[in-house]
Image (cartoon, grey):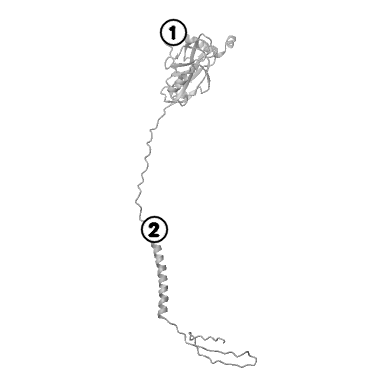
Amino acid sequence: MGALRAVGGPRWLVRALACASAVVIAVVMAGGAAYATGDGTARLRLDRDEGPPGTVVFASVQGYGGCRPAGVTTPAGGGVVEVFWEGIEDAVGSAVVPPNGSVEVMFSVPFGATAQRYSITSVCRTNAQLTDDDLFVVTGIASQLVRVPRVVGLKVAEAEAKVAALGLVLRVPSGAGDVVAGQSPTAGSMVRAGHAVRITTKQVVVAPARPAPEPAVVARAADPFPWRTTALVALAVLVAGVVSYRVVKWRLDKRWVRNHLRVVVPPAPALDPQLTESDSAPPMLVVRIQPHEDAGIHILQGG
């Protein structure tokens, strides 16, 4: 019990699993029956077998269909497969197992790893019988840090050239589109040379160019007959005619009356003049009565 406490539970488990894997490999090499795990044999294959610390490695695991809980059909409901680096208790990478039992797990070579050979182990988190391992040789020392460039919005070929110029690796998903839609690590992150930049892409559909609209040709109608102007002129002529008619008629009426009518006022009956003498009266006035053109009016004038 004291020895177990000193070693530690998780580390002891990893080492035990590694030993079990070595036994399975020995059996296979000896021609024995393969280790069966439900849907097939659990297999782990690395995309590279050596590299300096900081190197990004993609581990392809297959035959992990038995890691999925029974009755689960959705991709997100599968079990989890973890990848362990020899000498490190915590997993360096993990992924959800899809229905086909195959998945790719990405991890980086620990920066503290020295130049030697290490065992890499893949284990189902809920079923330790599903396990396999592979070997990786650490060479040299950790490379210098590189700042991840921004590749979102670039075409895939442009992004690949930009990343490769900095000593990084562009990881393009299958069935990719034309333009980079996302990236990991994000732009500006500091990583070691040789680190992989994973991208997501999108298909850009270029809409056909719309033809320029032709200028609308508006047929100019013939000038309509100037009814308004004609009506105004006619009204002005009519008013002028009415005024002229009234003036001429007034003049003609006055002339006709003058030529055909004559008003004669009969003279009023003449009164006999009365003379009154007075001693204090001023000198006697002489009154002279003469005919006047107007027979009806008599004017007395002093003389």
Tag 2's secondary structure?
helix
Of residues 226 and 266, the one nearer the viewer is: 266
**Residue 229: x percent and y percent?**
39, 58
Q: Which kind of residue does numbered mark 1 sit on?
A: Val
Q: Give residue 172's mark.
A: none
Which is in the foreground here, disc 1 or disc 2? 2
Decide which of 93, 229 is in the foreground and name it: 229
Residue 241, by quadrant, is: bottom left
Q: Horizontal and vertical percent for residue 30? A: 42, 6
From the image, tell me which residue sits under label 1. 27
State the SS at label 1: helix
Q: Which amino acid does label 2 sit on?
A: Thr
Whether residue 82 is visible, yes or no, is no
Relative height, residue 72 to residue 245 (above, below): above
Q: Where is residue 303 in the image (x, y as percent from the top left)?
A: 57, 87
Residue 212 or residue 29, whichever sits in front: 212
Q: Give the residue at x 42% y 70%.
A: 247
- For this orientation, the residue located farthest to the top is 30
Mark 2 is surrounded, within 10 Å at the Cα level, by few (under 14), some (14 to 19) or many (20 or more) other residues, namely: few
For disc 2, the marked residue is 229
The answer to whether residue 278 is above or below residue 63 is below
- The reply to whether residue 244 is in sight is yes
Which of the 4 image quarters holds residue 157?
Answer: top left
Mark 1 Cα shell of 10 Å, populated few (<14), some (14-19), many (≥20): some
Separation of residues labelled 1 and 2 (CA atoms): 115 Å
Q: What residue is rendered at 41% in x and 63% in y? A: 236
Query: What is the x, y in percent for residue 207?
Result: 39, 32
Does 299 sit above or below residue 214?
Answer: below
**Chain-order first, disc 1 or disc 2:** 1
- Residue 177 position (above or below residue 242): above
